[in-house]
Image: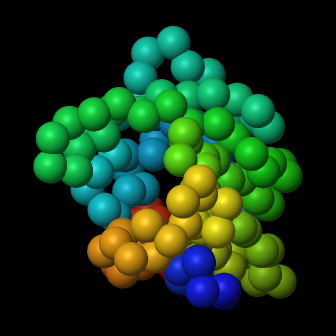
Amino acid sequence: MGQRQVSSTRTIATTPEKIFELLADPAKHPLLDGSGSVLAAQNGGPERLSLGAKFGMDMKMGPSYKILNTVVEFEEGRLIAWRHFNGHRWRWALTPLEDGRTQVTETFDWSTARVPLLISLSPFPKRNKVGIEKSLARLAEMFPG
């Protein structure tokens, strides 16, 4: 991708619809998270995400903290992305394959961040690339071929 994005792609042995159901449910995000920073969905948020939905997550990266996300891209069964106050995005794109499997691409995109240069100079892109690869591995374990 571009210089202000890191991503990884993996083929998963299930349909896009089954994967999307996990992504659209904030309570399931800790099961997918390979970074170890997503702890739980906060109470009071939507059970299922949609365009414009706001959802809070309990996080931990060093100290514990809470973050409020907004869904900024949404195509049922194919694409979902959310951002928080700093503007960078987490995007999941699902491409169906002929054999019932799905090509899944997760992207950390900081081109939309308020101060993208700070993120570029930080360890976050490299750290997030590793987390993305672990997230995709977790997803593959949920749907063994």
* Outermost residue to the top: 44
The spot of residue 9 in percent (x, y) is 58, 83
Q: Is residue 118 visible?
A: yes
- At a point 56% along the width and 29% down the height, the residue shown is 55
Would you say 39 lies left or right of 112 here? left
**75, above or below 47, in the image:** below
Q: Nearer the viewer, residue 137 or 122?
A: 122
Quadrant of res 96: bottom right
The spot of residue 115 in percent (x, y) is 54, 59
Q: Is residue 17 visible?
A: no
Would you say 67 lies left or right of 106 here? left
- At a point 78% along the width and 74% down the height, the residue shown is 95
Q: Nearer the viewer, residue 47 or 107?
A: 107
The spot of residue 27 in percent (x, y) is 46, 34
Would you say 49 lies left or right of 63 here? right
- At a point 55% along the width and 39% down the height, the residue shown is 85
* Outermost residue to the left: 62
Q: Nearer the viewer, residue 143 or 114?
A: 114
Q: Nearer the viewer, residue 116 or 145?
A: 116
Would you say 16 lies left or right of 63 here? right
**94, above or below 10, in the image:** above
Looking at the rendered structure, the number of numbered marks drawn on it comes to 0
